[in-house]
Image (cartoon, rainbow, N blue to C red):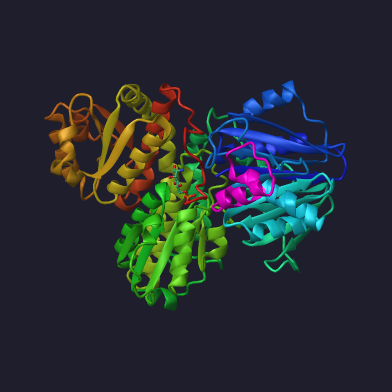
């Protein structure tokens, strides 16, 4: 899950623009980075283990010469440990070609052995160096970089987004894509390529999304996309409505905190234009493409996703059951591939993904389609693979999410699923106009109620609980019904950014084993907000306290009964039960953030993680 960026411009110097683009991609991988330029007929490379800041120090110490052509890369290691030698860009052994690559070449060992037998010399453990030598060899046969890249890729198995440049073609970049994301930027001063659009927002807002098996030849004033058969293709330009500022921290110390604070706006951006208050209904954009008849014909739903999106999907399943009386199941996308084929006829599969590029979720989507099923994508990135391959689409309008730990995207997904439940409930006659109007009214009212979560009186208890939690090694998150996926998500957030072991559990399950873990050093975080399950949750708190366990409880402001049963109470405004997950998850996001802050963790780029997991 690396980040790549490249530029070719008419004269001038692209080094700074490429480095700026690379920095916005750091969330994709941050164990080493590098840049290469073409200058005076030679390839020059600078690369360094560690964050992009280490590369900047290296560039300050040993500057790259100015160039109108450059490629750069930030790495999340798959083949070859994080080290200077394994950092990208990678050249061929004759310094004629240089490549940056995101993905995995599955048959690289076999190719490497063959190339070594042909006399090629390797100096790294990476699969990408094999690619560079393959392109170099083909280049010497074919004398054309585009032809060489296409010929080399015919021998490659696996996933790739790559950009190559060659000494013999100083004004050319060649890009190629298979399963890993790659967009082309169309600017007035140049052409660009990158793993995602935010990396190029400082240069252009006009993009061409490269599809699988496509290649592109970029020159400063032109770009040609070639199809799987090599023939040139007419490809339209997509305008990105995100602003460069949205991809910046905006004065917050971390993207995670900025994105947590953006959630009231995410609610407005994702929902308010779609609410039809008079009809008590919801209107999605054309991408949705499911009319009442289609929605009435549905017999069941299957939700699939990974990580935080999986927790949103679990909430979606419950909301659709509650408001549309549609039965469903939620599956971990990577497990779906091994499930026996069932009749897909009357089912709709809902794939939820922030990035739209998660390999496990995309494989599951393609498997459903292969089995004859239909897929509705809930996604945050227009132009992503999910957005393009799903039969039906609902975009969450969260703006770019940069913090590796997903927060506002989870929120946007749950809002979109709540809207979906209303739309299907209305179409199937389960909800009448009045009920629909009430549900929309409640949603609109939430925006103001959310603001209260960022007031000092709500933040102070979170900080106090974080002071305590920063001292523990392990804990349990408990919730019931809609609170269960919220507990799973709270536990995931804490794990991701603080590295404290945390498990989310349905509270009823506690007595069947996990209660054995509870003692003075093993606390419980519990979701005890108003609704059908609150009383049962209060009993669970007392069971924990009876065994000396500390309790951190999310509960309604002024809930004295919960306050009496908890050591720390994280207050939330009282909202309708179906909307509680949107409110309850915020103090849990802040708790994880504040705990990680106290432990001095790298909150936006936690160890071993990457924002978009593009390999299985
Ligand atoms: C969540 O904080 C993590 N970044 C991770 O679990 C993430 O949710 C998962 O990889 C799915 O990503 P997606 O939503 O982009 O598909």
* Residue 129 is inside the magenta segment: yes
State the image coordinates of residue 71 (x, y, percent, origin top left).
Answer: 72, 41
351 on left or right of 389: left
Q: Is residue 218 above or below residue 375?
A: above
First to last magenta residue range: 103-131
Q: Is residue 348 above or below residue 584?
A: below
State the image coordinates of residue 372 (x, y, percent, origin top left).
Answer: 44, 75
Q: Residue at x 50, y 61 (%)?
A: 394
Q: Residue at x 30, y 42 (%)?
A: 487
Q: How many marks?
A: 0
Instruction: State the residue in front, 345 or 586.
Output: 345
State the image coordinates of residue 392 (x, y, percent, origin top left).
Answer: 50, 67
Residue 473 appears anywhere in the view: yes
377 on left or right of 418: right
Q: Is residue 8 above or below residue 517?
A: below
State the image coordinates of residue 57 (x, y, percent, origin top left).
Answer: 68, 23
Residue 456 appears anywhere in the view: no
Q: Residue at x 57, y 39 (%)?
A: 125
Quadrant location of the N terminus in the rendered image: top right
* Residue 573 is inside the magenta segment: no
326 on left or right of 179: left
Residue 210, quarter of picture: bottom right
528 on left or right of 217: left
């Amino acid at each position: 899950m690396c980040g790549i960026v490249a530029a070719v411009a008419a004269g001038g110097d692209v080094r700074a623009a490429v480095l700026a683009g690379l920095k916005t991609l750091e969330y994709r991988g941050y164990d080493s980075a590098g840049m290469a330029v073409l200058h005076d007929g030679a390839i020059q490379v600078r690369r360094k283990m560690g964050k992009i800041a280490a590369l900047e120090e290296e560039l300050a110490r040993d500057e790259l010469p100015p160039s109108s052509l450059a490629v750069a890369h930030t790495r999340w290691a798959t083949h070859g440990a994080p080290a200077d030698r394994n950092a990208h860009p990678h050249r061929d052994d004759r310094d004629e070609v240089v490549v940056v690559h995101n993905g995995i070449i599955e048959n690289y060992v076999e190719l490497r052995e063959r190339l070594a037998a042909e006399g090629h010399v390797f100096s790294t453990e990476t699969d990408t160096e094999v690619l560079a030598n393959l392109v170099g060899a083909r280049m010497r046969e074919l004398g054309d970089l585009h032809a060489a890249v296409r010929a080399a890729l015919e021998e490659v198995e696996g996933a790739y987004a790559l950009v190559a440049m060659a000494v013999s073609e100083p004004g050319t970049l060649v890009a190629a894509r298979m399963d890993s994301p790659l967009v082309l930027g169309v600017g007035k001063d140049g052409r660009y390529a990158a793993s995602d659009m935010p990396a190029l927002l400082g240069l252009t807002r006009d993009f061409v999304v490269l599809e699988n098996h496509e290649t592109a030849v970029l020159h400063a004033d032109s770009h040609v996309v070639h199809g799987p058969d090599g023939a040139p293709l007419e490809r339209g330009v997509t305008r990105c409505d995100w602003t460069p500022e949205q991809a910046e921290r905006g004065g917050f110390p971390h993207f995670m905190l900025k994105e947590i604070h953006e959630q009231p706006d995410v609610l407005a951006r994702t929902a308010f234009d779609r609410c039809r208050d008079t009809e008590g209904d919801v209107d999605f954009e054309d991408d949705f493409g499911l009319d009442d008849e289609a929605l009435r014909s549905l017999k069941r739903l299957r939700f699939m996703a990974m990580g935080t999106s999986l927790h949103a999907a679990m909430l979606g399943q419950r909301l659709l059951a509650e408001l549309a009386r549609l039965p469903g199941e939620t599956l971990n996308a990577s497990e779906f591939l091994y499930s026996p084929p069932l009749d897909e006829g009357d089912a709709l599969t809902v794939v939820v993904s922030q990035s739209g590029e998660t390999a496990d979720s995309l494989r599951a989507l393609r498997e459903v389609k292969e089995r004859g099923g239909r897929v509705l994508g809930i996604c945050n990135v227009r132009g992503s693979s999910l957005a393009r391959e799903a039969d039906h689409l609902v975009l969450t309008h969260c703006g770019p999410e940069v913090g590796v730990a997903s927060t506002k995207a989870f929120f946007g997904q749950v809002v979109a699923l709540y809207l979906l439940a209303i739309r299907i409930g209305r179409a199937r006659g389960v909800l009448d106009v009045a009920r629909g109007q009430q549900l929309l009214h409640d949603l609109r009212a939430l925006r103001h109620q959310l603001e209260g979560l960022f007031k000092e009186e709500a933040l102070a208890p979170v900080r106090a609980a974080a002071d305590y939690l920063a001292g523990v090694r392990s804990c349990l998150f408990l919730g019931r019904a809609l609170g269960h996926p919220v507990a799973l998500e709270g536990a995931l957030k804490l794990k991701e950014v603080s590295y404290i072991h945390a498990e989310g559990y349905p509270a009823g399950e506690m007595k069947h084993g996990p209660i054995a873990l509870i003692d003075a050093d093993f606390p419980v975080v519990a979701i005890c907000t108003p609704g059908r399950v609150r009383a049962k949750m209060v009993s669970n708190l007392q069971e924990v306290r009876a065994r000396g366990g500390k309790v951190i409880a999310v509960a309604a402001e002024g809930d004295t009964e919960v306050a009496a049963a908890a050591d720390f109470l994280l207050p939330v405004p009282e909202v309708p039960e179906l909307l509680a997950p949107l409110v309850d998850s915020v103090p849990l996001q802040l708790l994880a953030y504040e705990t990680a802050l106290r432990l001095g963790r790298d909150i936006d780029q936690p160890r071993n993680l990457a924002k978009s997991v593009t390999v299985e």
